Image (tube, coloured by chain):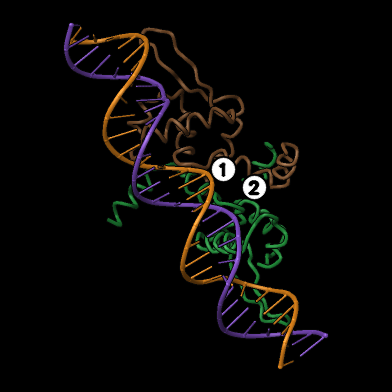
Chain colours: A green, B brown, C orange, D purple
Amino acid sequence: MTTKKNTEENKTCPAQALLKQLSGKWKPEIFRLAVDGPLRFSILLRQIEGSNKQTLSVALRELEEVGLLEKVVIKEKPLHIEYYLTENGKSLIPVFQQLENLG
Amino acid sequence: MTTKKNTEENKTCPAQALLKQLSGKWKPEIFRLAVDGPLRFSILLRQIEGSNKQTLSVALRELEEVGLLEKVVIKEKPLHIEYYLTENGKSLIPVFQQLENLG
DNA sequence: TTTAGTGGTCATGAAAAACTGACTTATTTT
DNA sequence: AAAATAAGTCAGTTTTTCATGACCACTAAA
């Protein structure tokens, strides 16, 4: 079963998986903001108007799960959490730049 | 209303729109196949296993609507329809290539 | 000690996307 | 003339995504 599923998924085009990781509400937006520096939940929530806790929470978790973002607990003065682009995530930056040059 | 909607959409990151055009089941797959040459409905249906008429039909129509594919009636011997990549669609090829190099 | 901020989860419901199977119209092959 | 192929459409159902509002644990400030 597991093997079969993997086999079937591998048949699809390589870009499909990548595209899927970034599809979902606010994910491209979140990614782009992450390029500029670490993200914080409550700030994102205010920054992205029209968004909501639940959707952002899920989007951040999923971006983390696919290895594009990393969640870091900052144990300093105002104890909080920051999301960083991983190396893997950074490798997508040129793709994004290309996309933006087309728009 | 229309103005407001546009304004709001323009706020989002430029890549978001492009990404959205290619998000949806089988769309990246269809796009990639279109790079290799014109597509035909019934052939796609056999080629992409797990797909179905309805979903493919909608995907093709939407790819056409956003101007990535063009639908052409071929009035030769076995009268049929072919979908071609538009110039606009071709401009996305390098983005795809980059994506594939990451996988 | 009440209040505010941070970073969420949970249950629920509405809306959008995808799947299924039956049916269609026109052409082509047998 | 009957059967097959091509390219779909349509209605109905299921699945997946999104959105809402209530709630929670912890910290920090007033």
Element at badge 1? helix
Is C22 on the left-hand or right-hand side of A97?
A: left
Query: At which x and y percent is residue A100?
Result: 68, 42
Residues B10 and A83: in front is B10
Query: At which x and y percent is residue A50?
Result: 67, 54
Find disc 1 in the rendering and name its residue.
B98
Question: Does mark 2 fall on the same chain as mark 1?
Answer: no
Question: Can residue B90 be seen at all in this image of the molecule?
Answer: no
The amino acid marked with disc number 2 is Pro
For image coordinates 67% across by 76% down, the residue present is: A80
Chain for numbered disc 2:
A
Chain for numbered disc 1:
B
Label at residue A94: 2
Q: Quadrant of the N terminus of chain B?
A: top right
Is C23 on the left-hand or right-hand side of B64?
A: left
Query: At which x and y percent is residue A44?
Result: 69, 62
Is A101 on the left-hand or right-hand side of B36?
A: right
The reply to whether the C-beta atoms of the residues labelled 1 and 2 are less than 8 Å apart is: yes
Question: Can residue A38 be seen at all in this image of the molecule?
Answer: yes
For image coordinates 65% across by 67% down, the residue present is: A41
Residues A55 and A78: in front is A55
For image coordinates 63% across by 45% down, the residue present is: B16
Query: At which x and y percent is residue B86?
Result: 57, 24
- Figure check: B79 above or below C18: above
Mark 1 neighbour class, 10 Å CA radius: few under 14, some 14 to 19, many 20 or more: some
The amino acid marked with disc number 1 is Gln
Element at badge 2? helix
Mark 2 neighbour class, 10 Å CA radius: few under 14, some 14 to 19, many 20 or more: few
For image coordinates 45% across by 20% down, the residue present is: B82
